Amino acid sequence: MGFYLYNPIMIPGIGQFRAKAIQDAENESAFYLLITRQSDNTGLFKKFYVDLKLPNSGAFSCLDSTAVQNIKQTVKQAIDQSYLQSGGSPYNFASAEIAGMEILAQIIGDIKSGNCCVPSDEAITDWLTSEGFVELNVPCNILGPINPARPSNDPNRAQKTMTGYVTDLAELSVELNGEPVILEDEINAFIAAKGLEDSNPIFYVTKNSSVCNGDYDFAESEIITNLPNLGGIVYLQDRLLGNDKIYLRLEGLMLEDVPATFADLGEYTPPPPGGATSFQDLVNIIREAEDSLINNGYQSIEDRVRILRGIYYGTTWSMDFEQSYGSTLRNAGFKAYLCTTSDPINPEQIFGSALYDKLKRSPEVTNGSMGVDWGHIIIGLEARMSWCSREIPISFHESSGLEITTWIGDIGGGAGMLAYKRVSNPNKRAKDMFSGSSDFGGWINLEGDIAAFLVGRDTNNFDLTPSTDLDDDDYIADAVEAYLLPQPATTGSEWHRRGELFLRMLGGNFNNSGQLTNEENLVTGIASEVEDFAENYVIVMAVGRNNDNNSSNDVNMYETSKHLAGASKEMTEIFVHTLKNAVSNPNQPVKAQGFNPNPTPAGEPYTKYKTIKKTKELIQEFEDWWNN
């Protein structure tokens, strides 16, 4: 039906005439598609209207008024787009209406096959954005179905169509860049060409109707369960107008590029007795070890620091290696964070077994009520001697190697573990991660983190990322002694000022009364670094625990990610509060006490996880693959 809007008899409005046309259609048939065309003073057929009536029983009983409205909108969009593509010539109105009829025929066919999914095109576009999909700049044309539709309740639909790493839940014949392709073959070839097989990838191909028939939910559940392995969903926005679209959503990471994060999967095991019994005793054995090294040709301060560090971290003879079940991954991580590619020598023969054993049993030393992590001091010294380690953020991280080997590793690791624990216990307190002495925010750990930044610092040149004021004529033992002693600390000594100095190095500002003035901004900045490390931490933890044949240890990455932001902020708030307390109470251990924030409710899950090739870069590679 066509009409002129400004014809004199149309002055009352078009509604009454459309209503008469609808009544005529209903008199002719119980169900109908009615297309009306409006002409006005600007020309013929300037606007199309669509009215529709479908059955409401049998296969169509699933339709509600919203679904019917969406169908009408989809048919109208098909007509409008076809008419526009033809140049808007009134002589092409029939082909435009046929395009709408073809869309309706496809939808009715889907409904009769048990697929009662009729989302509007506009709704689908908004939904794709919210789900993290990216539209690929690849010309796409969907030709039609390639197989008879499966029953939507078929529990084995994935197994029926799985080819390699890809499950086709759309079953559509597709042209990309004008060339017919089999998407399963294309994606499998891409995975092989990019060397992604070791990432245990799974991909699913879906379409508009997948949103409502359960296919999309099934695909999403599978890729989430597969995390942190690589997963993806290809989405075909099928409109059969030569203007179809292809989208891609990626989750997970490439396992060969997992960052070597300090994942303390087990509890800290204290060394056997026989180590240093006081701060002065620690200074004495460090001095004895340095004399032995110097007498054997290791006069360089850098060599002495590296050799002593190797007793505790990053070597196959280290205390950490023995506690980490022979973790070569952790050893590689220490090398990366220290910007080194080689191991120091094993000094056991130089020191003799008695001195060597006493040093190795002294990673943590107490002195009355005080204590310090000497292992943190020595690795911090090495990191500070390297411009690369102290200044440059490590790949996958916002933090430097110096920060990761000290405080960010402890606080960020604690935040990651807290997020993991909150999946099963949402009320788990962040304060619990500061209990004890040696794990995460334990007080000896915190004392070591602070000392790692302050021992041997250049007192004449304060720097937020400090180097050291040590050269080959200096002794590490002297620097340690100057920091730790005397005890109790005297006013103005390094130990007495340790809380204030460390907060300044983290970006804290103080007024003339010695009060921290930017706590809120400081917490926000630190929490971002903590969350970044926590994410890496749980990824590595998941890789380890998901392969230990103990399902009770498995890490649900999707659920864990909901707690990372909250856990990181709480850990940071306690951390900063603890350091503030150290400013006011310098002759007390730096121990978390008093402040105990309430657990943060679960937030939004992450849409992607760390990978050496960022999500957008991998999506670009997919796009390039199909364009070339």
Image (spheres, rainbow, N blue to C red):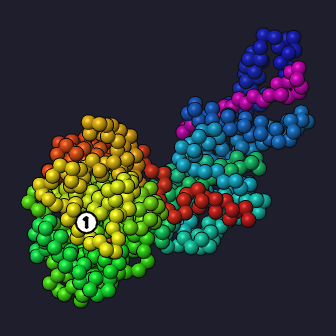
Which residues lie in the magenta part? 38-63
Residue 352 rendering spot, x and y as whole percentages: 19, 87
Residue at the outermost left position: 368
Total marks shown come to 1
Residue found at x 62% / y 42%: 125
Q: Is residue 434 visible?
A: no
Q: Is residue 61 magenta?
A: yes
Q: Please give the residue where the numbered disc 1 appears in the rendered image.
A: 479
The secondary structure type at the circle numbered 1 is: helix
Residue 469 rendering spot, x and y as whole percentages: 34, 64
Quadrant in the rendering for residue 45: top right
Examine the rendered structure and indicate whether residue 477 appears above or below residue 21.
Answer: below
Residue found at x 27% / y 43%: 599
Quadrant in the rendering for residue 310: bottom left
Residue type at numbered disc 1: Ala
Residue found at x 24% / y 75%: 319
- Circle 1 Cα neighbour tier, 10 Å, few/some/many (<14 / 14–19 / ≥20): some
Instruction: From the viewer's perspective, tell me whether residue 483 is left or right of residue 80.
Output: left
Residue found at x 32% / y 56%: 459
Residue 52 rendering spot, x and y as whole percentages: 69, 31
